[in-house]
C-alpha cells in the first residue's frame, strides 16, 4: 500500500512538473511575443463575443457531466452534497484554483480580502456547475 502511494505521488509530481516547466518557460517569452504580434492591432470586446463565449461555455458543462458520469458510482454513495463537494474540488483543482491560485495571489502581494473575493467568485462558478450537474443528473439521468 505504501509503495503504491509513493508511486502515485511520483506520477503526480512528474505530471505536475511537466506542466510547470512549460508554464515557467512560456511566462518569460510569451507576453513579449504576443505583444509583438499584436502591435498596431486593436481588440475590442463586444456583445457578439459574449454570445459566442456563452455558447461555447457548454464545453465546461459537457466535461463536468462526463466526469461526474465516470465518478458517480463511487461518490454518490456518500450523498448528493458530498458528491457536489468532491466534483467541485476536482474541477477547481484541475484548474489550479483550489489551493494554488489563492496562495499565489496572496504570495505576490494581494491583500487577503482581494484574494478571498477574487477566488471566491471562481469557487462559486465551479460550485454552481457541480451543484447543477449532480442534482440534474440524479433527477433526470440516474441509472
Image (spheres, grey):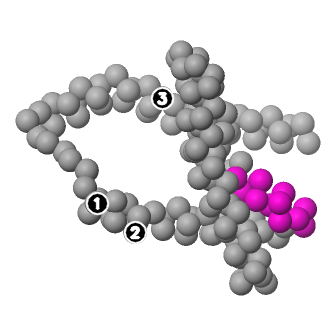
Looking at the picture, tell me which residue is in the foreground, 3 or 107.
107
Q: Secondary structure at mark 3?
A: helix
Residue under the point 20% across and 30% down: 35
Q: Quadrant of the C terminus?
A: bottom right
Q: Position of residue 30 (x, y in %)?
A: 30, 30
Whether residue 28 is in magenta: the answer is: no
- Which labelled disc corresponds to residue 72? none
Query: Which-is-in-front pick, marks 1 and 2?
Result: 1
Residue to which mark 2 is pinned: 55
Measured in 3D between alpha carbons, the distance from the residue under mark 1 to the one under mark 3, in whole angstroms, is 36 Å
Looking at the picture, tell me which residue is in the foreground, 8 or 73.
73
Query: Which-is-in-front pick, marks 1 and 3?
Result: 1
The answer to whether the residues at label 1 and label 2 have Cβ atoms under 8 Å apart is: no
Looking at the picture, tell me which residue is in the foreground, 31 or 125.
125
Q: Position of residue 134 (x, y in %)?
A: 73, 68
Q: Secondary structure at mark 1?
A: helix
Residue to which mark 3 is pinned: 21
Q: Start and end of the magenta stretch?
A: 77-88
Disc nearer the start of the sequence (1/2): 1
Q: Position of residue 107 (x, y in %)?
A: 58, 17
- Which labelled disc corresponds to residue 47? 1
Location of residue 121 (image quadrant): top right
Whether residue 84 is in magenta: the answer is: yes
Disc nearer the start of the sequence (1/3): 3
Q: Residue furthest left?
A: 40
Amino acid at each position: 500500500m505504501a509503495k503504491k502511494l509513493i508511486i502515485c505521488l511520483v506520477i503526480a509530481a512528474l505530471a505536475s512538473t511537466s506542466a510547470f516547466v512549460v508554464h515557467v518557460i512560456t511566462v518569460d517569452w510569451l507576453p513579449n511575443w504576443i505583444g509583438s504580434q499584436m502591435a498596431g492591432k486593436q481588440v475590442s470586446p463586444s456583445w457578439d463575443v459574449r454570445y459566442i463565449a456563452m455558447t461555447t461555455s457548454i464545453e465546461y458543462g459537457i466535461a463536468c457531466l462526463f466526469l461526474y458520469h465516470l465518478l458517480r458510482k463511487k461518490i454518490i454513495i456518500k450523498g448528493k452534497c458530498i458528491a457536489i463537494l468532491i466534483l467541485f474540488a476536482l474541477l477547481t483543482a484541475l484548474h489550479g484554483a483550489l489551493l494554488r491560485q489563492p496562495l499565489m495571489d496572496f504570495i505576490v502581494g494581494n491583500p487577503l480580502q482581494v484574494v478571498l473575493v477574487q477566488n471566491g467568485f471562481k469557487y462559486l462558478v465551479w460550485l454552481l456547475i457541480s451543484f447543477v450537474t449532480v442534482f440534474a443528473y440524479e433527477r433526470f439521468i440516474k441509472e
